Image (cartoon, rainbow, N blue to C red):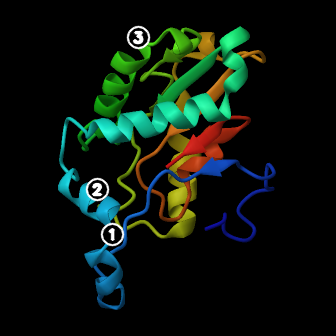
C-alpha cells in the first residue's frame, strides 16, 4: 500500500524486504493456506513470547547477505517498530532472541541490537483495535512515532527495522529514512 493521495510529499522509495508471508483466513485463499508451512508457523506463534529458531536464523542470514561489508567495519543497528501501549511487546521479545544469537557470533560483532531506538508518544492509537482508516493510520504513526535513542542515530551506521505485519504500510515510511525494513 502507499500513502493516501494528498497526505504528504513522498520521501522516495522505502527499501522493504519480506521474510515471510501469511495468507489470511479469506475463503478464496483456503487452498493456499493448507499447504503453506510459513502461514501455519505464523499462526502457531501469533501469541508467542518465544519464536522458532528458524525465524532468528532467517533474519541473521538476511543481515549477513544484505550487509556483507560489516565484517570489515561499520555498524548495523537492528531495532523493531515498537508495540502500542496496550499490546504485548512481541517484537521486543523476538529482538531479545536475535540479540542472544548476535552476541554469540563473531561475524556479527558490528551489530547493535537496540529495542528502544524507536518509541510511541502517549496518545498513540491502536491501528486495528480503533479501526483506523488508511489516512488515520498514517497520521497516527506520523504524529506519535519518534526516535527514542537519538544518540544511536548518525550518518555512518546502517539501520535495520523489523516489523511483524504490514497492512497499510503506515509505519514503514516513517521509520525507514535510509534504513532497510524487513517484515
Q: In this view, does 106 lie above or below 57?
A: above
In this orientation, does residue 83 appear?
A: no
Q: How far apart are marks 1 and 3 (CA)?
A: 32 Å
Query: Is residue 73 rendered to the left or right of residue 59?
Result: right
Question: Where residue 103 is drawn, which disc sits there?
Answer: 3
Q: Evaluate if marks 1 and 3 touch, with contact meaning CB atoms under 8 Å apart.
A: no
Mark closer to the observer (2, 1): 1
102 or 5, nearer to the observer: 102
N-term mark: 2 or 3: 2
**Label 2 to label 1, Cα distance in Å?**
10 Å
Q: The residue tagged with tag 1: helix, strand or loop?
A: loop
Q: Residue at x 66, y 63 (%)?
A: 3
Tell me the crowding category of disc 3: few under 14, some 14 to 19, or many 20 or more residues within 10 angstroms, Cα based: some
Residue found at x 26% / y 77%: 34
- Label 2 vs label 3: CA separation? 26 Å
Which of the two discs, 1 and 3, labels the residue nearer the N terminus? 1
Residue 135: mark: none
Secondary structure of the residue carrying numbered label 2: helix
**Residue 17 image offset from top left, x and y in percent:** 60, 50
- Count of numbered circles in the view: 3
Q: Which residue lies furthest to the bottom in this view?
A: 28
Mark 2 vs 3: CB contact within 8 A: no
Category of crowding for the residue at label 1, using alpha-carbon neighbours closer than 10 angstroms: few (below 14), some (14–19), many (at least 20): few
Q: Which residue is drawn at 59% across and 46% down?
A: 142
Q: Residue 36 carries which label?
A: 1
The residue that disc 2 covers is 42
Q: Examine the image and state in which quarter residue 120 appears.
A: top left
Q: Whole-percent x and y of residue 104?
A: 39, 11
Amino acid at each position: 500500500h502507499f500513502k493516501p493521495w494528498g497526505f504528504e510529499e513522498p520521501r522516495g522509495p522505502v527499501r522493504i524486504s519480506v521474510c515471510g508471508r501469511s495468507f489470511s483466513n479469506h475463503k478464496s485463499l483456503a487452498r493456499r493456506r493448507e499447504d503453506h508451512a510459513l502461514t501455519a508457523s505464523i499462526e502457531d506463534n501469533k501469541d508467542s513470547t518465544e519464536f522458532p529458531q528458524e525465524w532468528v536464523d532467517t533474519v541473521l542470514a538476511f543481515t549477513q547477505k544484505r550487509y556483507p561489508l560489516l565484517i570489515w567495519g561499520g555498524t548495523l543497528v537492528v531495532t523493531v517498530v515498537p508495540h502500542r501501549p496496550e499490546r504485548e511487546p512481541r517484537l521486543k521479545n523476538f529482538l531479545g532472541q536475535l540479540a542472544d544469537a548476535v552476541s554469540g557470533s563473531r561475524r556479527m560483532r558490528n551489530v547493535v541490537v537496540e529495542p528502544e531506538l524507536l518509541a510511541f508518544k502517549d496518545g498513540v492509537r491502536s491501528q486495528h483495535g480503533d479501526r483506523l482508516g488508511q489516512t488515520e493510520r498514517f497520521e497516527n504513526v506520523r504524529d506519535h512515532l519518534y526516535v527514542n535513542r537519538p544518540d544511536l542515530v548518525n550518518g555512518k551506521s546502517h539501520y535495520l527495522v523489523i516489523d511483524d505485519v504490514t497492512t497499510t504500510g503506515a509505519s514503514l515510511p516513517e521509520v525507514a529514512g535510509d534504513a532497510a525494513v524487513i517484515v
